[in-house]
Amino acid sequence: MRTEFTVTQKHSKKKDLSLFLSCEHASNKIPAAYQKRIPEKILKTHHAYDLGALQMVRLLSRTLKTPAYTGVVSRLVIDLNRSLHNRKTLFSRFLSNLNETERQTILKQFYHPYRNRIETAVTARIQDNHCVLHLSIHSFTPILRGHKRNADIGLLFDPAHRQEAVFCRRLRKNLAALAPGFKIRMNYPYLGISDAFTTQLRKQHPSKHYLGIEIEMNQRIFIEGGKKLQLLRKTLPEAIRLSLK
């Protein structure tokens, strides 16, 4: 989806934004080779995947008419949203005893194909003289380590990246207008500069070519369902569309 929202850089021409969607934690699937290592009961928890994120990115893809790239393996095997140097969370604790050959096999089968596919697509759009707006769709557990997360939606971005901040302010304003009951917070429950795929892509592409934003949704909305979930499904695509004008 190419939009009317423009990015202006000093001493440069305006560039249209090309919308790009991804969902790194879409799946809770465990390949057969690792199923005995990971307890089945954990597969339905937030440790395995981002509840509701896949259905939302698919809805956004249909509504906004732009492709969505989704992960096909659980982060209990490999976290597609972490960089290679992040050995603390790249592989889960259940696979901490893998040898280097086994780790490289997982990287080759799941990590590199996913990341390379997106990196290639982003680069192609940039070479087509468009600035990419990458929305990475996630959800967060309502309670973490006994602490209640106080937000419905979080917008994660780099505060030093002016255009990312501008877009997120627009999106928050439009969400607040369409769904006044939602609590929307910036760079919550995580920081937009923390280790993530968007963070890495910012390093590869200058700000005049790439905007990387993570949209975090409270899993409580998907667990409870009902009117709040219906409102989220109705308003998030429309708020994004309005923010691109």
Image (spheres, rainbow, N blue to C red):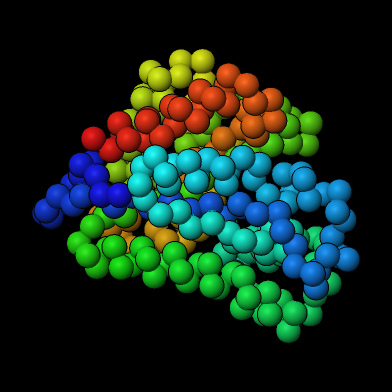
Q: Is residue 95 above or below residue 22?
A: below
Left or right of 124 in this view: 50: right
Q: Please tell me in which quadrant of the rendered image residue 138 appears.
A: top right
Question: Where the C terminus falls, by quadrant?
Answer: top left
The x and y percentages for residue 8 are 18, 47
Q: Nearer the viewer, residue 50 or 231?
A: 231
The x and y percentages for residue 45 are 76, 44
Q: Is residue 144 above or below residue 95?
A: above
Q: Residue at x 40, y 54 (%)?
A: 67
Left or right of 224 in this view: 82: left
Q: Residue at x 38, y 18 (%)?
A: 177
The x and y percentages for residue 223 are 69, 30
Q: Residue at x 13, y 55 (%)?
A: 12
Q: Please tell me in which quadrant of the rendered image residue 217 appears.
A: top right
Left or right of 12 in this view: 83: right
Do we see residue 154 in this rendering? yes
The x and y percentages for residue 81 are 57, 57
Which residue appears farthest toward the bottom when viewing the image?
101
Left or right of 13 in this view: 75: right
Q: Residue at x 39, y 40 (%)?
A: 63
Q: Is residue 221 above or below residue 22?
A: above
